[in-house]
Image (tube, grey):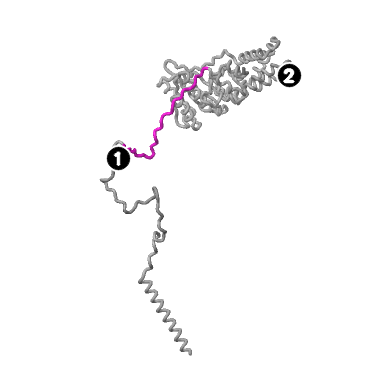
């Protein structure tokens, strides 16, 4: 019995070995059938129409002789594109600024906020039936709130009290005329408010524009160029504000609008050198006026103020500077007087430019800054438009304050 079992096991082992050998030979001698191609598995393509339709296989092929060539006049030759070479931009259109004569009258509505506080407030108080001490104190407060200043306020109130007492009966028209005369007298009509921008025999007039950061100095320089061009002057701009990023670009944009050339130097370069070169170019071109935009330096930085004096001395190697305009922000009020005082100690200020006068109820700063420096206000900024810089006219300014 044991012999039979052993024989069966041996037989099973032998048969298993033989079957494995047969399978191995079959795998070695015969490769697996190739996988079917994807196209063979895909469903038949649907018929296409329009631009997606395929060309039928039986379509006859076109030879060179059968192709119609276009006429020579209809062939468009495309210029090859050269990478890295920008397209040539057309020069900017030259704008024609509006004339400066009567510009302040046209911008009268911009003084509406100052009008409500100063002019109309004073007229309302003076129209009261009984002008007692409390009313006169209110008149003083109105003037002080409008930044007229202490001394000018006291002077104006005394004159008003005297004339109202003499006048007796006060009609609205009489009060308006009285107030207009006194405000014009307070501002002053004797000062020379003209801009000295006429060229000399061998060189242009030179105008330096100075001021602290944030007063709109570079913008004012650009607008002043428009004022001069509108009055028939040829202008060269000097971008001597080399410390503020993009200041030269900003000034050049203003100049390009009216056809004025801008002389500039490297960023962070010597401002005095740029100013000197600007005047030199103005002489070479025979320009009427050179406008030099200086850096918007803080009045508390003594070293920077000394540098401003250096710019003026270097420019004067070509000849005297005709105008030094100090740009003041009307919204700063009495703080602007501190700035004005320090700048006047460094360079001889010849005129004041008051910017942002449309956005403030402190129109009296015109009086205060003139009294502080003994220098007239020559230009006022009454908006953000390119032609919103106007020559200052006391009569038109007071008319705007007190209304019709």
Label 2, label 1: how far apart the Cα atoms are: 97 Å
- Viewer-proximal residue, 50 or 308? 50
Q: Are marks 2 and 1 in contact (CB under 8 Å)?
A: no
Of all residues shown, which one is farthest toward the left? 65
Please state the horizontal and vertical placement of residue 12, each as a whole percent of the image. Answer: 44, 82
For the C terminus, which image quadrant? Answer: top right
Number of numbered markers: 2
Q: Is residue 2 above or below residue 399?
A: below
Q: Which residues are magenta?
A: 74-101
Dot 1: what SS?
A: loop
Q: Is residue 41 left or right of residue 129?
A: left
Which residue position holds label 1?
70
Q: Nearer the viewer, mark 2 or mark 1?
A: 1
Magenta segment, prevailing SS (helix, strand or loop): loop
Circle 2 residue: 134
* Mark 2: few/some/many CA within 10 Å (<14, 14-19, 20+): few
The kind of secondary structure element at disc 2 is helix
Relative to 395, is 252 on the left or the right? left
- 286 and 359: which one is in front? 359
Residue 196 percent location from the top left of the image: 49, 17
Where does residue 83 sit, x and y in percent of width and height? 38, 40
- Residue 55 belongs to the span the image colors magenta: no
């Amino acid at each position: 019995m044991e012999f039979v079992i052993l024989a069966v096991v041996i037989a099973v082992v032998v048969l298993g070995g033989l079957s494995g050998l047969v399978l191995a030979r079959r795998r070695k001698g015969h490769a697996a059938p190739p996988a079917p191609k994807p196209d063979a598995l895909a469903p038949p393509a649907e018929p296409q129409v329009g631009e997606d339709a395929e060309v039928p296989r039986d379509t006859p092929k076109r030879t060179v002789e059968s192709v119609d060539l276009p006429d020579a006049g209809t062939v468009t030759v495309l210029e090859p594109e050269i990478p890295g070479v920008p397209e040539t931009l057309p020069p900017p259109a030259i704008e024609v600024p509006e004339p400066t004569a009567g510009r302040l009258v046209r911008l009268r509505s911009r003084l509406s906020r100052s009008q409500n506080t100063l002019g109309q407030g004073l007229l309302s108080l003076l129209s009261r039936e009984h002008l007692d001490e409390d009313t006169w104190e209110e008149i003083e407060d109105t003037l002080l709130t409008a930044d007229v200043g202490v001394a000018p306020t006291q002077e104006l109130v005394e004159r008003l009290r005297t004339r109202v007492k003499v006048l007796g009966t006060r009609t609205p028209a009489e009060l308006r005329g009285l107030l207009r005369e006194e405000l014009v007298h307070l501002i002053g009509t004797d000062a020379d408010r003209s801009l000295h921008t006429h060229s000399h025999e061998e060189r242009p007039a030179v105008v330096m524009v100075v001021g602290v950061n944030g007063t709109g100095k570079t913008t004012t320089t650009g607008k002043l160029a428009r004022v001069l061009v509108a009055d028939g002057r040829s202008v060269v701009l000097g971008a001597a504000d080399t410390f503020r990023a993009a200041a030269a670009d900003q000034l050049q944009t203003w100049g390009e609008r009216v056809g004025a050339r801008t002389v500039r130097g490297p960023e962070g370069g010597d401002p005095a050198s740029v100013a000197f070169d600007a005047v030199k170019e103005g002489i070479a071109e025979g320009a009427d006026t050179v406008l030099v935009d200086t850096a918007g330096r803080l009045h508390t930085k003594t070293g920077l103020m000394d540098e401003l004096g250096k710019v003026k001395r270097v420019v004067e190697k070509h000849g005297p500077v005709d105008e030094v305009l100090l740009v003041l922000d009307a919204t700063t009020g009495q703080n602007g007087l501190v700035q004005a005082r320090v700048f006047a100690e460094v360079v001889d200020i010849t005129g004041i430019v008051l910017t942002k006068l449309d956005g403030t109820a402190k129109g009296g700063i015109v009086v205060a800054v003139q009294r502080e420096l003994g220098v007239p206000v020559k230009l006022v900024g009454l908006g953000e438009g390119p032609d919103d810089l106007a020559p200052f006219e006391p009569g038109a300014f007071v008319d705007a304050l007190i209304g019709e």
